[in-house]
Image (tube, rainbow, N blue to C red):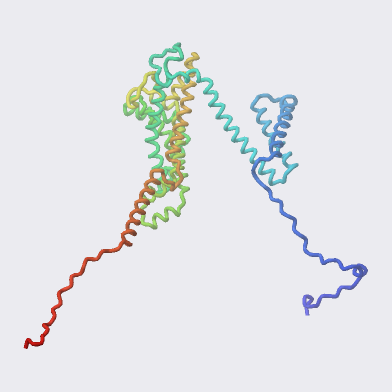
Amino acid sequence: MTTLDLPPAAAVPGPAAQGPAAPPAGPAEPRPEKRVKLGGVTREDVFTVAGSSIGSLALNWTLYERVLPFSGAFGFLVCWYLLFLAAYFTLGRLQWGPLLVRERLVSVVAWSAGLLVLALIVDQVGYLAVRGYEAAQHLNFFTESMERTAALSPITSGGALNAIVGSLEQVGLATLFAVPLGIAAAIFMSEVGGRMAKPVRTLVEAMTALPSIVAGLFVLGIVILTLGFDKSGFAASLALTVMMMPIVTRASEVVIRLVPGTLREASYALGGSQWRTVWNVVLPTARPGLVTAVVLGVARGIGETSPVLLTSGFTPQFNADPFHEHQVSLPLYVWNYVKQPYPEMVARAFAAGLTLMALVLVLFVTARVLGGRRPGELTRGQRRRIDREARRAESAARAARAGAHAPVAHPPVAHPPVAHPPVALPGNS
């Protein structure tokens, strides 16, 4: 017989047992859990941020300006930000738990980074707008070229029409060349593969870091000096193609690799070929990412100056033919006029820079509107066509049901005459 099999020992009554019986001690009730709410802005958050900012600013000014031998606005701002983060962490640790402090510290870093980027963008746009407003406020800047404008001409004479048209044509041709080639190369590396996939990927990665002046020299040496073509907008578009194609290829390959493999397997299971799978499944699924790749490529090419200078030259005249004669672009227009010592020319250069930013914004928004739909999302025309077909099918089904329940008129049946036997009458014997 083991110890576990023995009966429980009887309690020996003691002095404490002679009093009133104490209630049986039950299990202690669990303490209610306190829910920690992450996210949101409270009054404590606002006061903590404000106190950390003011305290860190005062401490930074004391150390930076009075104690330490430092100077400069950039260093002052960097030290202020670091002291602000330290002060915010210290004050937050006095109020909240470790998890909440870390979460709110990361939120503050993210918010401050976003505000910094927004401030830089506003500063750039505002600076260009202030410096270029003198020229951009006149309509002639967008409707005239610099063909009949001298250095000392008033601001109401001349404009950047030739540069705007040149940039649109050169970037348009470069996009027409770079996007199909880049997406085709990305499909080859991600879908086809083989022995040549790795060398192609290595070459594309090397071309991504290619300096723009090298691309201009390459087109200048091969297309213009060797093949004998003149400097033109077409040659500039070839140089921009060399710059844009690696960006489009790298970004497109990453996006295509993110397409789930189950979609490809489903297409193959239904009998689709590899070409049909890529064309009807992979590319439509990756369409938003491919639009982003195109936008990145255009952003790389639209602001280039050195390859355009080497391949298209500079001219103040209006030239809408990209295949003949020199043609100027907006970056080249800015580069040529901003270094001149005449205020009117400098104002035109800043107005051209502002126009370039507006042009980039319009192109990006257009690309997002045209190709930014989610995979499988239908356009308005496709939804209207599906609704029309559904209504037509419903009308046909309703007509078929009405015809099935209508009474059927049967034609009268003609019965053959019945031959009766002759009846014998009495008296006719």
Q: Furthest residue to the front?
A: 427
Count of numbered circles in the view: 0
**Residue 246 in view in this figure:** no
- Position of the N terminus by quadrant: bottom right
Res. 117 image quadrant: top right
Say which of 339 and 112 sits in front: 112
Q: Position of residue 384 (x, y in %)?
A: 39, 45
Q: Position of residue 225 (x, y in %)?
A: 34, 26
Q: Position of residue 358 (x, y in %)?
A: 47, 28
Relative side of 336 to 79, left or right:
left
Res. 45 image quadrant: top right
x 14%, y 75%: residue: 417
Say which of 394 and 372 sits in front: 394
Q: Position of residue 197 (x, y in %)?
A: 42, 46
Q: Is residue 194 above or below residue 63?
A: below
x 38%, y 14%: residue: 148
